[in-house]
Amino acid sequence: MDYFEFETLVEDEGNDKYLILIIYDISDNKHRLEISKLLEGYGTRIQKSAFEAWLNKKHFEKLLSKLKEMTRVTDNIRIYKLHGYGEVTVLGDQNYVNGDDVIII
């Protein structure tokens, strides 16, 4: 078990960053790949359909804008902007999922 505490607001010379969690359920394989490629440019894949990212306000708004443009009616994309103190407990396989490890059939 990996247990750690974090403060989700990181001050970086006036460039505040927040921990963002993005999870999605997209049935179309090609479209899901497009979304995951976009998210890889902003954060780290932590599960097949989940990404974590430390983003400042400008990058968060840019990502949100791009996702809004790409989102289809049948998509389910959830974006959590975490504030304050939090903690993460990781159980089981603690390795990040590499995009190359995802097999779409």
Image (cartoon, helix red, strand yellow):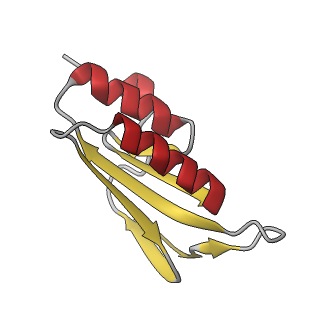
Q: Is residue 102 visible?
A: no
Residue 69: give x, y in percent of width and height: 39, 38
List x then y, in percent, for residue 4.
52, 73
Q: How many marks?
A: 0
Q: Which quadrant is home to the N terminus?
A: bottom left
* Residue 95 placement (x, y as % from top left): 44, 45
> What residue appears at the point 75 percent right and 66 percent down from the top-left corner?
15
Q: Residue furthest bottom?
A: 85
Quadrant in which residue 30 is drawn: top left
Image x and y of residue 77, in percent: 29, 49
At 59% from the left and 58% from the top, the residue drawn is: 54
- The answer to whether 86 appears left or right of 77 in the picture is right
Q: Is 36 on the left-hand or right-hand side of 71?
A: right
The image quarter containing residue 34 is: top left
Q: Is residue 77 visible?
A: yes
Residue most toward the right? 13
Image quarter in which the C terminus is found: top left
Q: Residue at x 32, y 51 (%)?
A: 23
Q: Is residue 25 above or below residue 104?
A: below
Viewer-closest of 1 and 8:
8
85 over 20 or under it: above or below: below
Q: Is residue 27 above or below residue 82?
A: above
Q: Residue at x 57, y 73 (%)?
A: 8
Closest to the observer: 42 or 74? 74
